[in-house]
Image (spheres, rainbow, N blue to C red):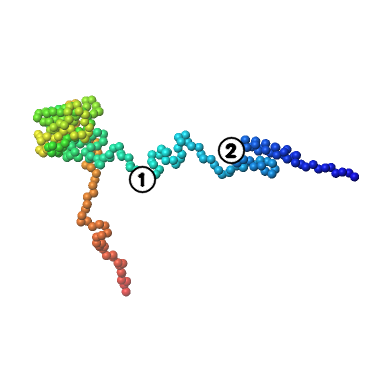
Amino acid sequence: MRRSPIRRPLSWLAPLLLTPALLLALTLYALFPAAGPPPVTGSSGWAVVVTLVGVQSPPPEPAGGTVRGSPDRDTGTDPGSDPTSAPAPEPTSRPESGTDPGRGGGGRSWPLAGRPAVLRGWEPPAGPYGPGHRGVDLAAAAGSRVLAAADGRVSFAGRVAGRGVLAVEVARSGSPPLRITYEPVRALVEKDADVRAGEPVAVLEAGPFHCAAGCLHWGLRRGDAYLDPLSLLPPSLLRRGPSRLLPVFGVPEPGTGPAAVVSRPPRAGPSRRRCPR
């Protein structure tokens, strides 16, 4: 009678199977320490690495140490304040309230405020000593401020034949330079003083005048030649100014008055001829 072989228990195989699994788990944990929680050993002995999906790390901070949306960011305003309540910056220069009708561009101006009336114009003489009017007379009352007609430098301020005279050489006007004269005036500036167009330079005296009423005699010369002082001014200053619409009274508006009656001649009807019977 044959004997069956004796079956030995398999408990001695357990250490051989667990040792490779533990070594594999330790190796994966050492290679991926921040990938997630510790590896979990499955029933097959393989290590399963679980990673967290959908969890993102915060973005790195910039070099300055500020974060977007932080109140420390240099934006110029406090995030907690109302931007509309912040005071507006003051302008560096105040805008002019209006333009002077007697002053134009290019360093030119009427020698009196506004647009003075010309009482007598320039009448060039036929010869050096011939009769004529070597300048322009502008209507003005005694005590009126006399303004510089152009940028320049004062070349004379004194009295000539009992009249106060002021002469200004026009800047950048060539050689010999243009020279503007005003009389009879009391100068407010001294010789060699620089003046700007429109700046008060004198006060009109109480005579003697070139005209019957009070006026300023305004002259212009280049060397010994007399010129028209109005040639200094640009066309914008020589014009009378913009047109203005004036109100009209007593004229009915269109469509409000009585309807007009139009008479027409009567139409001529067709001629009737009688047939002979």
Examine the rendered structure and indicate whether residue 57 appears above or below residue 245. Answer: above
Q: Which mark is residue 158?
A: none
Foreground tag (1 vs 2): 2
Q: Residue furthest top?
A: 175
In the rendered structure, which disc, 1 or 2, sits on the residue that comes first in sequence?
A: 2
The secondary structure type at the circle numbered 1 is: helix
Residue at x-position 76% and y-position 41%: 10
Q: Which mark is residue 34?
A: 2
Residue 193 shows in the view: yes
Question: Looking at numbered disc 1 in the image, what kind of residue is underneath it?
Answer: Thr
Between 38 and 121, the one lying in front of the other is 38
Q: Which residue is mark 1?
A: 84
Residue at x-position 69% and y-position 41%: 45
Asked if the residues shown at circle 1 and circle 2 are in contact, with their CB atoms under 8 angstroms apart, the answer is no
Snapshot quadrant of residue 21: top right
Q: Position of residue 202 (x, y in %)?
A: 16, 33
Q: Quadrant of the C terminus?
A: bottom left
Q: Position of residue 38 (x, y in %)?
A: 62, 40
